[in-house]
Image (spheres, rainbow, N blue to C red):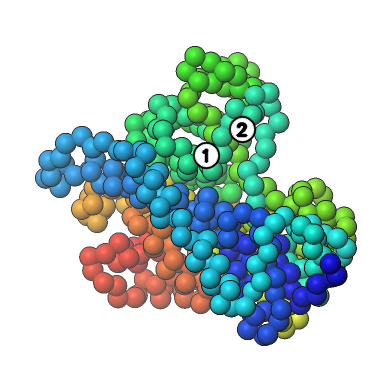
Amino acid sequence: MGIEKFDTVILGGGNAAMGVTIATRAAGMSVALIEDRDLGGTCPNRGCTPKKILVAAAQALDAIARAKTHGIEVGTPRLDWAALIAREKMMIKPIPERLGKSLADRGVEVIRGRAAFAAPDAVKVGGRVLEAKNIVIATGSRPRTLPMPGAEHMITSDEVLSDATLPRSVVFIGGGVIALEFSHVYVRAGVKVTILEALPRLLSTVDADAVDRIRMESERLGIAIRTGVAVRRIEPAREGFRVVYDEGGIERSIEAERVVNGAGRVANVDALDLEAGDVKHDGFRLEIDPTLRSVSNRMVHACGDVLWNTPQLSPVATYEGQIVGRNIVEGPRHRPDYASIPACVYTIPALASVGLTEAKARENGGKVRVQTTDMADWISTRTYAESVAWAKVIIDAASDRILGAHLVGHSSEELINLFALAMQHGITAAALHRRVYGYPTFSSDIKYLL
């Protein structure tokens, strides 16, 4: 079979890849997309979408637990874990087919298989060789491997989302987003949960005070959190597995039915033969310029979770893919701006952030005003029997523009978008304060957080 020619070949079929196809197909370019798993990638199939279904169930349990505050007497709820997992699978099952139809309608050729570079301007998949003017690496990420004895006993979030049996106990190795979110689901389902984190604190890139609030709430729920520990090995034990770790120079151990790798994710590039594509990298991290092009091969672009220094978030992947698509069509003119992109950790309550942390804002120099507010006694908080409601807003003293916002509880996953909108469009803190909001709403409390 001869070499097939395309204007653009995309490696991967997740959100970033979908974003690339918009501008390229609108410009009439020929586009092939190569995916060896389900279309949609991690987020809709093995990540944020199915996880949020479990989070929604935990939110319902949380609401039931607070019902008595509202004068509602209810019995002890019982979660049918197998039914919840079945519901999750039922809801995500149609997604790849729908995405496939969308790509077909857009005129994108979808090729099934695992791709690798054959040359700087070509890739191979199965018995086919595809030559392209532009090649996009959008292969996403995979769980970070942990080099320790017994690592094979760990499961990942993929298995958590497919396990129809609710374990009695779980240990998460790593205290990142995955560990915290699943811990809040598990603990409300009656599971004994422990988090072991090597760093001195959880969520090291998030504002420290916000993390402290969510840690206190997690521990109030019964989640055991150990930071600054070194896990040495995992071994079979009577209760399932024993995790042996060092804490303060003392060897300790804990047994659990499941041990989950919560150490984050790394770029999924090891099978791409980047050397054949003349793509500079260090084994995991691609060297990319500000327009998301390879510094060594200007025909190659990258976007989504495959990038090591940008937020690993579904909407960010789509945003980066759209930028790559526009750069392919219009030339390398567009650069992503992450300054006002919000992020949420879907604990219960959620932790939401946008912009700079207080530490980063002070490190950058300039005078800042930091408004920290504990809303625990506010009537809006007590009306909904919130267990924690807290906010920190960082404001540039000279311009009155918002540099960052960090919220815990109080519908933070929704309110953060208002702060992000203000940051993107230069709306000052004073203007947000003067705004007339619908009342009584959580949004109407924003003026008192500034």
Asked whether residue 148 appears in the rendered view, the answer is: yes
Q: Quadrant of residue 295?
A: bottom right
Secondary-structure class at tag 1: helix
The kind of residue tagged 1 is Glu
**Camera-side residue of 142 and 176:** 142
**Camera-side residue of 396 and 161:** 161
Is 161 situated above or below 297?
above
- Mark 2 and mark 1 lie on one chain; the one further toward the N terminus is 1
**Camera-side residue of 197 and 60:** 60
Q: Quadrant of residue 412?
A: bottom left
Residue at image location 63% in from the left, 18% down from the top: 249
The residue to which callout 1 is attached is: 159
Tag nearer the camera, 2 or 1: 1
The residue to which callout 2 is attached is: 198
The kind of residue tagged 2 is Ala
Q: Residue 104's x, y, as percent? A: 58, 74
